[in-house]
Image: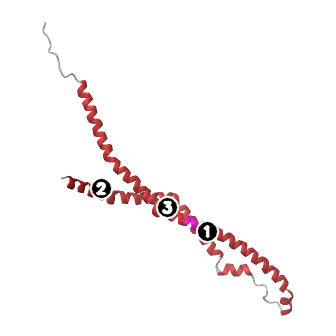
Amino acid sequence: VQFLRALTTTCTVVTVLLYLVLPLAVFGASRLSARITRPLIQQSYDAFNQVSRTFTRGAVENGLGEDGKGASAIETAMGVAARYERLKKQLRELEAYLSEQGKSLAATTFQLIAGYLFDCVVFPLAFAAVLILFLRGMPSCLAQGQRDSRLVETIRETDRPVFTPPESNA
């Protein structure tokens, strides 16, 4: 009888966990994710898109420019030194820009990983733990309520007189 009672209790707990706790944990985690991490993840995607647009072929070509178009060979040869200095300056600017973008992308990537980690692991586990603790505490709370009501009933019964003296007609 004790084995069957333990087996029934275990099966009941597993069933409640599968049908109640798991869906509620996922639902609660999705709501929490929508409020906390979705804006961060969207911000990360926006940053990735902006960097992607920066490095498109047209943007890179427009940034380099076309100095030698329509110039004669002598004009081109005379402007080599100026072009070399301008190219050196552009390469330094490009190096600084790429360094800044690299740091930005690293921070954005970390933010995206943290957002997905919280969405997929932390929030569901936290909600499952809270719901499991709630479900484990519910029977003891109900049992405590029954004990309290029995105690109140016992106190009321003890307050009543057990023996009532007969009324005298004297």
Tell how many labels: 3
Marking on residue 2: none
Q: In the image, is residue 98 part of the stretch drawn in magenta?
A: no
Q: Position of residue 99 (x, y in %)?
A: 69, 71
Three-letter amino acid code of the residue under disc 2 = Val
Seen at 27% across and 29% down, the residue is 155
Q: Position of residue 64 (x, y in %)?
A: 73, 81
Residue 8's place in the image compared with 103, above or below, is above
What's the distance in space between the residues labelled 1 and 3, CA to CA?
Answer: 18 Å
Q: In the image, is residue 109 part of the stretch drawn in magenta?
A: yes
Residue 148's place in the image compared with 59, above or below, is above
- Which secondary structure, mark 2? helix
Q: Quadrant of the C terminus?
A: top left
Give the residue number, with chain letter if any, for mark 2: 13
Residue 146 lies left or right of residue 69; in this view the side is: left
Residue 83 lies left or right of residue 127; in this view the side is: right
Marking on residue 106: 1
Which contiguous range is marked in magenta? 108-112
Give the residue number, with chain letter if any, for mark 3: 118
The quadrant holding residue 53 is bottom right
Seen at 48% across and 60% down, the residue is 33
Q: Earlier in the sequence, mark 1 or mark 2?
A: 2
